[in-house]
Amino acid sequence: DSGVTQTPKHLITATGQRVTLRCSPRSGDLSVYWYQQSLDQGLQFLIQYYNGEERAKGNILERFSAQQFPDLHSELNLSSLELGDSALYFCASSAGTGRSEQYFGPGTRLTVT
Amino acid sequence: GENVEQHPSTLSVQEGDSAVIKCTYSDSASNYFPWYKQELGKGPQLIIDIRSNVGEKKDQRIAVTLNKTAKHFSLHITETQPEDSAVYFCAVFLSGGYNKLIFGAGTRLAVHP
């Protein structure tokens, strides 16, 4: 158990809908990262927050957004969902930013029908 | 951008044999190289990492070697056991303002009793 929690574990929704994925980092970690894992694209970095502020951005679509709250939990919002958004979404946390060990949560499996 | 190539994509060994997975990268400024193990239905688990000022690091049956000149690093698992069966991912930390991990495509390791 990494200490990173994610909810929900599974999510099934229809195209065009909006969902919110939630992540709580390990105790004491200030950074939260979001990743998408699909069969054809592998593990792709989406976005990082550090102590409430956006710190780095990857291949995140404009339909997706994230935020980190004062209690350091983070939410990833996915809107106007398409079939191709079906994937595993992982959250990771680390103590700092930069070359810090990242610990992954169990993931949320999103299925868009 | 940074490109991380991982080989082989699948690896099958007999219990007790050694397994070696190799990754190459393109950005010479990269300075942090973690390895993750992902079991079915779980999030990636950090198993070992190495930083650019070190050539080799060991932790019991696993070791990682880094050749910065050639821009490649490898994971070595000795005395493999069936519970080592999983997908292994290498990653490269891209600094210089990007602050993100770039993952290899993964190696599916099967250890047969």
Image (cartoon, coloured by chain):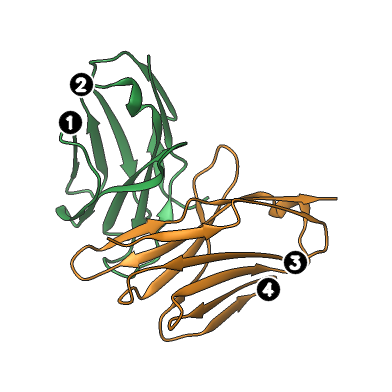
Indicate the quadrant containing the C terminus of chain A: top left, top right, bottom left or bottom right.
top left
- Circle 4: residue type: Gln
Give the residue type that dot 1 points to. Arg
* Residue under label 3: B18
- Please name the residue that numbered disc 4 is placed on: B60
Count neighbours of disc 3 (C-alpha within 10 A) and say few if under 14, some if 14 to 19, many if 20 or more: some
Q: Residues within 10 Å of mark 2 (few under 14, many from 20)?
A: few
* Residue A31 shown left or right of residue A63 in the figure: right
Residue at which label 1 appears: A63
Instruction: State which tag comes first along the sequence, 1 or 2.
Output: 1
Q: Is residue A32 left or right of residue B77?
A: left
Residue sitting nearer the eye, A30 or A98: A98
Find the distance from the CA under tag 2 to the CA under tag 3: 47 Å
Give the structural element (helix, strand or loop) at label 2: loop
Q: Amino acid at mark 3?
A: Ser
Q: Residues within 10 Å of mark 1 (few under 14, many from 20)?
A: few
- Residue type at mark 2 is Ser
Residue B35 relative to residue A94: left or right: right
Q: Residue at x 56, y 66 (%)?
A: B22
